[in-house]
Amino acid sequence: MSPILHALEHEKAKLSQMERKLAERILSSPGEIVHMGITELAEQCGISPATITRFCKVLHFKGFPDFKVKLAAEIAHSDAAPQDGGSSYQDIVAGNPLSVIVEAMQTNHLTSIRDTTSLLDLERLQAAVHLLCQARRVDLYGMATSSIVAQDFYQKLIRIGVNCTAFADSHMQITSASSLTKGDVVFAVSYSGETPETIDALMCAKASGASTIALTSYGSSTLATLADIPLFSSSLEKGMRRGDMASRIAQLHIIDILFTGMVSTRFGDFIPRLEQSYLNVQQYRNKRGGQS
């Protein structure tokens, strides 16, 4: 199932009666929906076109046409994928030989990256790159596994001279957010989009005047709703035994896109800093005999 259809299935219980009827119609025949006009779909579901538009915006699309374009792209990806089950996420199984584990991890990671790429909104990405390039200061927030993603972005940004800090402690997140002002940016990571500490820190930063970017799994969530710019990774990975493996890879994929976009945008500023940081690290490593 595509990320959009998976999100619809997952969110169905939270929807109003009219929205649930629409979700069920989409889930029953997604291939038909991409060829329908909003009026035709509204008549079939017994709802107003305005309800469809609101429904699409809750799912972070610009409207029904944008929803159809993204859904059509996902259906095309699904049709082109192998039909032998190789494109499905695979959980940890007792006694699996290492060769099967290697193949499963490759499948999970590649599928996660592909599904995440299909969800990317280039306008949102460009807006995020612009904010990060112009920021006076960047705060990066994330708890538990999400802090690893935030820390990865921190290590990239610090190499190009961006004034930034990654915070994994909830008290320090609030403390730092309290000191932000207009021109500062918060980048908050939460796979669920419902991590209370991350939500509180982002809300505090917004109240202080900072711009906010959220990186979370696709679907409606508190963090995505609060952020100025929500960015989404695939939400297909489920199961307590997976250890947030494919989801972490998907989020790092977006981090790499943002970082590369920033360097490309301000190539003349950032490339010399990137090269200088590399040369300095090499110099001090060589002084110590190549030890890390």
Image (tube, grey):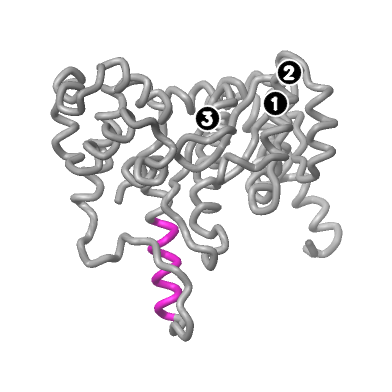
Q: How many marks?
A: 3
Check disc 3 and report the residue beneath it. 230
Depth check, mark 3 against mark 2: the one in front is 2
Residue 57 visible in the displayed image: yes
Q: Residue at x 29, y 36 (%)?
A: 23
Instruction: Please state which amino acid type lies under the numbered disc 3.
Output: Pro
Segment colored magenta = 99-110
Q: Residue at x 60, y 28 (%)?
A: 213
Depth check, mark 1 against mark 3: the one in front is 1
Check disc 2 and report the residue beneath it. 207
Q: CA distance from mark 2 to mark 1?
A: 6 Å
Check disc 1 and report the residue beneath it. 203
Residue 159 visible in the displayed image: no
Instruction: Please state which amino acid type lies under the numbered disc 1.
Output: Met
Q: Residues within 10 Å of mark 2 (few under 14, many from 20)?
A: some
- Residue 263, compared with residue 94, is above or below; it is above
